Amino acid sequence: MSISLNDTLKQKIALLPDSPGCYLMKGKGEILYVGKAVNLNSRVRSYFSSQPHSAKVQALVDRVDDFDIILAATNLEALVLESNLIKRHRPYYNIKLMDDKHYPYIRLSLNEPFPRLTVARRVENDGARYFGPYYGTSAIRQVTGILRRSFPLRTCTLKLPASSVIRPCISYEMGQCLAPCAGHVTQEEYMNLVNEVIAFLKGRYKPVVDRLQIEMAQAAKEMQFERAAELRDSIRDIMGLMEQQNALQTAQVDQDVIALAQDGLDAMAQVLFIRGGKMLEAQSFSLPREGSEPRDEVIESFLTQFYEERLPAREVIVQSIQDPATAEAWLRDKKGGAVTLTVPLRGDKLKLVDNALKNAEDALQKRNARQQVREERTIGASRELAEVLGLDSVPRRIEGFDISNTQGSQSVASMVVFINGEPARKEYRHFNIKTVEGPNDFASMNEVLLRRLKRISDKDNPWPEPDLILVDGGPQQLAFALMARDSLGLHVPMFALAERLEEIYLPDQDEPVLLDRHSPALHLVQRVRDEAHRFGITHHRKLRGKASLRSRLEEVPGIGPARRRALLSAFRSIKGIREAQLDELAAVPGMTLPAARALYEALHTNDAPDA
């Protein structure tokens, strides 16, 4: 099956990175679905491929007109970030598919004299130290087993120190506990071991892995292959467990992370919002003409503007800044409380900055691509159109004209204006056809062009002279338009676009010009033609609705000219009359209750047209 993609989707799909992260599918500005991906490029592309989809996915794709991505440092970060985004936005297509589970942590009860090592599902404010979250309880159980063999901390719920010596349990016999309950280890020795565990869980796990690799090699040498396989799996699980992630930190912190990407011309600032340890949102801010300025100066200027009307987090982490002390004092004054400004050089906070920078670079790349496409579709298309039409200069102001009527009645014309290849909607105009009777689009086009071009020399209210005029239709429409121009002695370039084969007709040329269907110039003239048609049809439908309602108003028994004038004076319009309640209609001077009831019923029958 073929899928029609708009320009926004085409641009963003072409620039998808081969990186882990989350994607937010959107329709009409609403977030419809949040997903995660090991590879954003392949995952997001799969939605818009021709392969069959499930009914739910197809329904989603049919509504999607845009998407955003947030890059992640690791697959695990993408997993947890997805959970945070779903909790925040509650997208429609996630509600029944994504559960709200809590990912497991490793917990050290540092609030006890002899801390315990356990697995927890929630981070509590209980004085304990939490590490994680980690995906998969089976992996955590395997690695906690390794931790107990390498760092034999207790897991029991006994309150220690005990009032009397307790006989050790089987964990001591298995070498998985130092038995502080039996007094086999001092508190100082035990806490030294706890500190080693903390270092291990914070990422300094190489010594343990090295030892396990030595044991695995020794087991293989002694032909203890089952033992070697167990050690191999343990090493694999440790490496998976220790995968660093930043999407959900264990500390309950509020942080804003700011980084800047530059390309020599422009810049893109990226802000990551972390609340309660959770990265909840990422926003990009385009900074034109800041691409070659000193980075620390740009960030400082951005920071002061960004926080001018919002409060900073408890900690603001920046890539660099010109005067950290002054900026921190300014932030504290803005918040009216404590704020720490950090410029990290290493560690987890630097990884947060690196992640923000990756997102900034991605956003800047997309922005540049959009600018390039916009240039091609507007100025570039106008330049190409000038070459096709043989114009001496690139047309800045292009006007498009279209005629709309219903079997020759209520004929109207629309004029749309494109300046530098983009719609200038404030310049749009409608023309009610005055001199032509019946369905004569040619004569109507002649009348409209004559009236419009006369406005160029209007002393009281002159209109700008167009650089190019597009007529919707074929050679005959163009001929009548040229007659209007030539009768005024003007030399405005004109051409026509016929819809059947999208042929371009030029004055004094018998054969039409056919442009490549991918040509930016063709796309530009199609946009002008389609906009003129849309603008004309919308106005014509409104006129038909008003005329039909006015006709129905005149047909109501007991509603003569005097009462019609009184009703219009009271409710300002036909639409106002239709929206009025029965008692409001009856209260109009000159109206009676029977007349009001007859009018109300006539205007609210099922076939009454919308005004």
Image (cartoon, grey):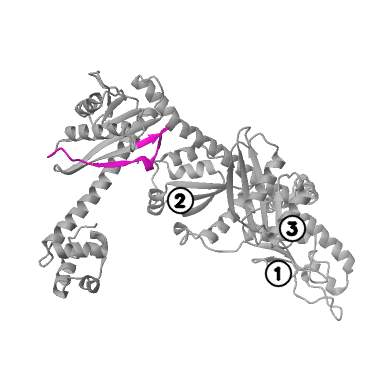
Question: Which x, y percent locates residue 565?
Answer: 19, 62
Residue 78 within the magenta-colored segment of the rendering: no
Which amino acid, mark 1? Asn
Question: Which x, y percent locates residue 325?
Answer: 78, 51
> Which disc number belongs to residue 125?
1
> From where the camera sits, is residue 212 visible?
no
Residue holding disc 2 = 26
| Rendered position, 18 above or below 186 | above
| Rendered position, 141 above or below 514 | below
Which residue range is magenta in the image? Answer: 417-437
> Which disc number belongs to residue 146?
3
SS state under label 1: loop
Which amino acid, mark 2? Lys
Question: Which x, y percent locates residue 492?
Answer: 31, 25
389 with respect to 481 (left or right): right
The earlier-in-sequence mark between 1 and 3 is 1
> Which disc number belongs to residue 378?
none
Q: Residue at x 35, y 36 (%)?
A: 417
The earlier-in-sequence mark between 2 and 1 is 2
User: Where, by quadrant of the figure, is residue 134 drawn?
Assistant: bottom right
Q: Quadrant of the N terminus?
A: top left
Towards the viewer: 172 or 421: 421
